[in-house]
Amino acid sequence: MSNITETRTLAPDEDGLRQAAALLSDGALVAFPTETVYGLGADARNDTSVAQIFHAKGRPHFNPLIIHVPDLDRAETFAVFHPDARALAQAFWPGPLTLVLPQRANAGLSPLVTAGLDSVAVRVPEHPVAQGVLQAFGGPVAAPSANPSGRISPTRAQHVLDGLSGKIAAVVDGGACAVGVESTILGFDETGPVLLRPGGLPVEAIAACLGKPVAARAEGADISAPGQLTSHYAPRVGMRLNIAKPHHDALWLGFGPDCEGATLNLSLGGDLVEAAANLFHHLRALDAQARPDQVIEVAPVPEHGLGLAINDRLQRAAAPRD
Ligand code: TXA
Ligand code: MG
């Protein structure tokens, strides 16, 4: 929460893990070590907590986050595994491999975790402290690296404090991370496995396990083919941004107290964290109720704090498409 003044350092023992889990259940942000880098964790089902991740990191974009779970069984409750995905999970989990898979209907994840996409990135970390936090908490934990946006990833608790002290509830100190680079991210398209981000697990090991080549694709690259790797969420109907006076036939997504008559409001009080938490819920709700020819108009959202990330997403969602 934004009113945190002191970030607690928790020991990696039973009491520390219990406190970390209790804080996560309360919706607070807790950093913890994985074998790759320290992650900044939040309850992946809690919209406000996930919005706080972006707020604490000062991220100007809502890129989708990885959810962390303790084992394959738990992962299968959130994502749909096909045979290749299951073979990789069995071979390399727990470990530095993240799989991007179709999200299960009613998975219960905040849409902010997946940036509104129908896919979800899942990882089972090996680090005993990460395992301990996940087991004590019991739910899915969204966790990007625990550093301010644009800075290098932390591999020690002190690095986390250097960047985020005062902005997060706690860090569990589990010493230095062994791998030191982020997990390898693998997706799948119609032709097979696609490398989305090189990382701690060599791509050769993935190819050897599957007995087939892994296609290369740079992280964040636009994927034009239809399917699960679509790079960003966009509603079915058209959108117009920065509309203070909506056309009478439009659905109007408001922001702040001056949007009387808005169909929905991202935050009546003009709170950007609340607006971020509501963003994908409201876009989906408006898209579901819109007639095909109807347009979603969005009130101006200020260009500061999480407003930058909200506007970035709105611009992508409103961009012309094929
Ligand atoms: O090692 C790691 O993976 C660390 C530790 C903390 O687990 N976590 C990490 O998370 O690096 P993060 O949030 O920095 O990486 C998220 C990246 C996104 O930038 C995107 O490339 C990819 O994961 N990603 C997540 N969900 C995706 C999705 N549904 N489709 C495509 N790519 C996705
Ligand atoms: Mg990072």
Image (cartoon, rainbow, N blue to C red):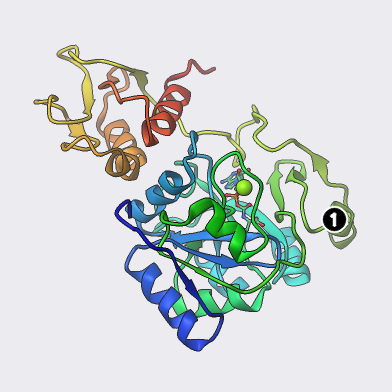
Q: Dividing the image into 4 quarters, which one contains the N terminus?
A: bottom left
Query: Is 93 rendered above or below residue 206?
Result: below
Question: SS of the residue at dot 1?
Answer: loop
**The quadrant where residue 19 appears:** bottom left
The answer to whether residue 259 is left or right of residue 186 is: left
User: Label 1: which residue?
Assistant: 202
Q: Residue at x 77, y 63 (%)?
A: 179
Q: Position of residue 249 (x, y in %)?
A: 18, 15
Residue 196 visible in the current orientation: yes
Q: Position of residue 164 (x, y in %)?
A: 49, 53
The answer to whether residue 243 is left or right of residue 80 is: left
Report the front residue among 245 and 162: 162
Q: Dividing the image into 4 quarters, which one contains the C terminus?
A: top right
**The quadrant where residue 277 appears:** top left
Total of numbered circles in the picture?
Answer: 1
**The quadrant where residue 45 appears:** bottom left
Q: Position of residue 163 (x, y in %)?
A: 54, 51
Q: Amino acid at mark 1?
A: Pro
Report the front residue among 7 and 71: 7
Residue 79 visible in the current orientation: no
Q: Residues within 10 Å of mark 1 (few under 14, many from 20)?
A: few
Query: Is 154 rendered above or below residue 20?
Result: above
Q: Residue at x 34, y 63 (%)?
A: 27
Judge: label 1 CB < 8 Å from ligand 1. Answer: no
The answer to whether residue 281 is left or right of residue 124 is: left
Q: Position of residue 301 (x, y in %)?
A: 30, 25
Determine the residue located farthest toward the bottom in the rendered image: 14
Q: Residue at x 60, y 62 (%)?
A: 158
Q: Residue at x 64, y 56 (%)?
A: 154
